[in-house]
């Protein structure tokens, strides 16, 4: 009996919650479609995106913050149906050396993703985000090279999508894909609620999903007409190859 | 017995040969997939794109040029498997009044296209091309309006794609879709050969197709790996709505 | 006793509801600050933005639609504290001849606005919107010319701002101003509710205001820290002249 | 004895003084090199760029303004060594019908220019300027078409350059050519002084020339090192074809 | 008796003279308005912007050059009314490690600036300039993070402005703010004259100030009409938050 | 007897074959015109662009791959008439430290190039390419600085051109120069054939040359009309300084 291996996807997240706000719908949706979705969290967002924990005062330490954020991220990944690993390379500022690059290239080789999700190419509010997507892109290129660990199976040219940054226009981010996440919204919102320290963002990203849902409905043809409520926007970095324009 | 109506597509071409060079593959491919593809030729390219005919000298007249170009375009459409109509609004310069706009809006209502193909938004070498795509876009908007000919069936929001201009970088045209037209290349090349007066372009657009084919192969993932030889590039004007990023 | 004339502002709206969704906060806010704000509605949006009315069926006529939309727009302007006039030049498609241009230039001369609000420069979903802002800009230029109706008081160079389109990224609209409209939100929402036929947009634009409010809080310095809940985004077309960068 | 006809150039100026401020150096320089340079002034700038004349009060009329501006422009052209003609199509707003387009296309055919100078593609301060360059570009395209007045000698594809607008960055104008006009600066400044009504611009454009001169010196290699004092900036609309990159 | 602390501003300058040419007016103006303006000079410009000193020949050393440039910069800062410190991280090429980043983040925390001035994001003529503004931006982000030196007072989100590079269009720098520096021009010019080794730039930047002054006058409304002679241009990196558009 | 030194040019190539595909025509053409053209290969492309060699299996080693690629590159340079040196800094990923930067700056000083050729500023498919052009640009800046190795002859400001990347539109590369390489095409094609391991690219880049040749013919004026068959496209990074626009 033949076994067809599941399709896979890779998400590269700068901080421990980014993949939830920005790509939680895509993760849950593709997991529901049978994809093995794997998430790499480059850092826990311990310095820059854990304000509420730090405000607890002097007893708080970086390792406590990291542990708390790891737990939340793991719980969110579980809800979304994805696996997750943590590179723990630090944030604010994030820096990536060659070792980290090769580590991520090795993930690409292991996962052999059908598509990749990461941050926007530009974000004047957050320098870790562009670094993450650039790292993901360069790792993808390394993983394509026959001369890197010769003999290993190289990767193809999976499409890469930038998920939505916090202030999209200021990041020159322009979605060319609107993903209908209506059927998995409950999972995304459950994952969002794992982020106990960032409650102020729960409703913000609910509204983002509603707006993208309305916009999705405004961009479909007659035969596609259906009930979309929640959406996520993505910007393609590469052209897509297809046999149908409909 | 139920009848599922065929899906449809609409191509808006400024001159009588544009749809062949730039979208012949997409037309043949979707026709082969069962789409009813309809082409609107706004002009015959009688003034600006019929140099060889005019060089025949004094006996040549505009109506003779038009007749010749119409015949070629009809033959090409036949080969590609599409229907075609001619608005005959003149070229070099092309101008469109409200009547032409409504005429095209009515075509949108009649055809109810799943997708639309037209020119690039900018072309410093050819002012008729941007006019054609702007006309197509505005006609699409009119056809969406409940208050235009109230009671008629309005159109949805079909995606619009710009096909490839002659000098793509100078037109700020950047393909985000690469269409694999390998299986219909013979039809496209047969249609190209209908354009007797523009033989200098036959090999030019063959090379375009080969280059886009190579590029398509460079933009696909592992599971999609297949033999692409000929391609056509398209630039989306609107975001696409989807449930899958793979 | 000296009388200092009130400052003034001018809003140029393509359709009868645009000024409400997109600039209702700015209008109410400046009215509350003592500005005389004047709105020009170029059309009633009778064809393209009155779907609910048209769906009432055969008894509906264009003049009934116009009357209904005029009433709503007038009510909204009253709530916001602005004056309004209707050019009634038609929509879908909107076209403006020289007469309309001069009519609007005359409004500029009469109002002598401190600033001008209108649409985004680009909108692939709506061709009337860019036309409106281009008309506004050209009318402003005519009104600055000494040789147009020589002897009349010309206008200065008031800043022009593009208000937010429905799908901001698709319109290449990038806000460089975030206006705090928290204190007048109740008025804006009351004006929004005048638009009986477009109830689906009420919550959409409430969410827009909440998102812009959150973003505004993310873009202020220490001393400016205050409670912003609702915002409106604007894109400046001209550089602003100032004596303070703080 | 063979006669080699002089090379030619064409300048399309929206108003009667534009060619002086923006391209006076190029005109004088190429005239000095033996080119026949021909200027088309589409209008006299009678409404929008003749403020000082209009401020003379009620005795001033449009025909007096035009006559004064014509005289100045003719004097400037004489100094620069160019021929000039006036289309007198009006300004503020400028509008061009098909007849004007064909009239300009006929100038292209008659002049057979080696290169063309006109305005920037965008100018939010002045809508006549972009109209002029668009008209020039479309006329060039018409003049290239074999089917326009068949039998006449068509034009080639002469490069088109946008000269410098008043506020370059606001017009998204970016010079890719810096022309050394040092040796003809005296002529340009003499031509500038013909514009009696716009004395406030004399020193403005002198400073522009000095800045472009300094910038030119900053963009030359070792062997080209020479004494440049005055410059003019141009933006190419088309790629240049060459056999040398040095 | 209550003491209201002075507002503050921070200027990050790659080389020792950049803040003078590019932001001297803003510094003097805000100092005159009561701001405490603090300048960080990342380097002395000892290698790349001290040509005249180096041309003195073999007796010149890097430490002599640095001392001379420091003295000039200190004198200029004194005239402008600002404090200054020197990071001395080297130039041509400038490189910044994490230690430098944290050092600058600590300055942000100490100064708590209302606004920040630095270089343009791009400069093909000078790679130290973009590095400086990127360093400033990342330091600002670090200084905002609760997890960086927890317990310290974090900074808000002060606006950041790019001052004018030497060849503005080539740097894709587009001013959206024109600052009227007429009343402090004498101070700016006095500070400029401290730069003994770069006399060729004195008149260049005087002309820049005059051009920006003229442009400022072209961008103001009726009630703002006033006598502006000298200006400085700035490009905002973030949207401004305001309650008034007039 | 006076000796006029030959003009020189510098090519900075990330991998050992880039200069052939992308600039082989320019190299051969200028060599034929008497230029001394010098090529710096930063790496051999041993990891990322030597797939065919690696596929030979386990006996292949990095040093064997390098030796093979060096030989090919040397042979190609010989055919084109250029000198070549290899920095051997590694590829996939390429990284450049200060030592490499200074080494390249020293090449600039030694060569004193009239112009410089390197990669496009952006390339999402290949991160070594942008690194190479950025390194070239920064080295050029260092070589211009009087304070770098004081006393040495500094370089001027030679123009820098980006040659054509593999997928031009995806790299936002837009040619503004089309170089006629017809007369040296045989040399370029002979050099191309040295790249034994990349035979799939031979016809790809032949087609590129043919397309650029056709486009060149479409961008020339009457008097320049001549027979161009093969071309290469270049994008200027700096404005060119000239005394003639024809």
Image (spheres, coloured by chain):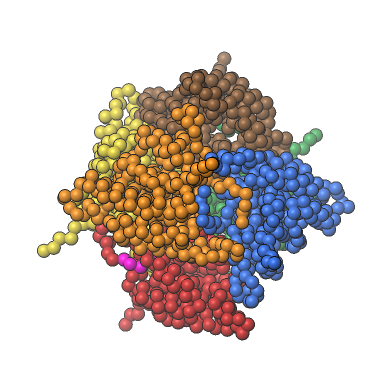
Chain colours: A yellow, B red, C green, D blue, E brown, F orange
Q: What stretch is highlighted in magenta?
A: B228-232
Q: Quadrant of the C terminus of chain F?
A: bottom right
Left or right of D214? Residue B115 is left
Image position, residue B236 (x, y; %): 44, 61
Quick one: which residue is furthest to the left in this view? A1
Q: Choose top left, top right, bottom left or bottom right for residue A183.
A: bottom left
Q: Where is residue C28 in the image (x, y as percent from the top left)?
A: 60, 45
Q: Where is residue B169 in the image (x, y as percent from the top left)?
A: 48, 58
Q: Which residue is drawn at 39% across and 58% down?
A: F187
Q: Nearer the viewer, residue E81 or F116?
A: F116
The question of residue B229 being in magenta is answered with yes
Residue for point 30% across, 60% down: F199
- Front-lying residue, B224 or C160: B224
Q: Taking D10 as reference, is E66 above or below it?
A: above
Q: What residue is at 60 percent from the left and 24 percent from the top?
A: E196
Q: Can residue F15 be seen in this view?
A: yes
């Amino acid at each position: 009996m033949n076994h067809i291996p599941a399709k896979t996807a890779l998400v590269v997240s700068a901080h421990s919650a980014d993949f939830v706000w920005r790509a939680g719908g895509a993760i849950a949706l593709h997991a529901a479609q049978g994809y093995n979705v794997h998430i790499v969290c480059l850092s826990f967002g311990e310095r820059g995106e854990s304000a509420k924990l730090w405000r607890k005062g002097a007893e708080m330490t970086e390792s406590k913050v990291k542990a708390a954020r790891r737990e939340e991220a793991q719980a969110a990944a579980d809800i979304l149906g994805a696996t997750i690993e943590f590179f723990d390379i630090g944030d604010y500022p994030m820096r990536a050396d060659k070792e980290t690059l090769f580590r991520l290239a090795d993930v690409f080789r292991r996962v052999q993703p059908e598509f990749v999700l990461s941050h926007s190419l530009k974000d004047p509010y957050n320098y870790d985000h562009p670094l993450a997507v650039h790292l993901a892109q360069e790792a993808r290129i390394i993983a394509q090279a026959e001369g890197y660990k010769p003999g290993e199976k190289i990767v193809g040219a999976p499409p890469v999508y930038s998920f939505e940054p916090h202030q999209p226009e200021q990041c020159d981010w322009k979605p060319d894909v609107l993903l209908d996440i209506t059927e998995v919204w409950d999972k995304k919102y459950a994952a969002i609620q794992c982020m106990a320290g960032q409650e102020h963002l729960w409703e913000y990203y609910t509204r983002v999903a509603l707006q993208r849902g309305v916009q999705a409905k405004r961009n479909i043809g007659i035969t596609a007409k259906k009930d979309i409520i929640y959406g996520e926007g993505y910007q393609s970095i590469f052209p897509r190859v297809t046999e149908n324009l409909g």
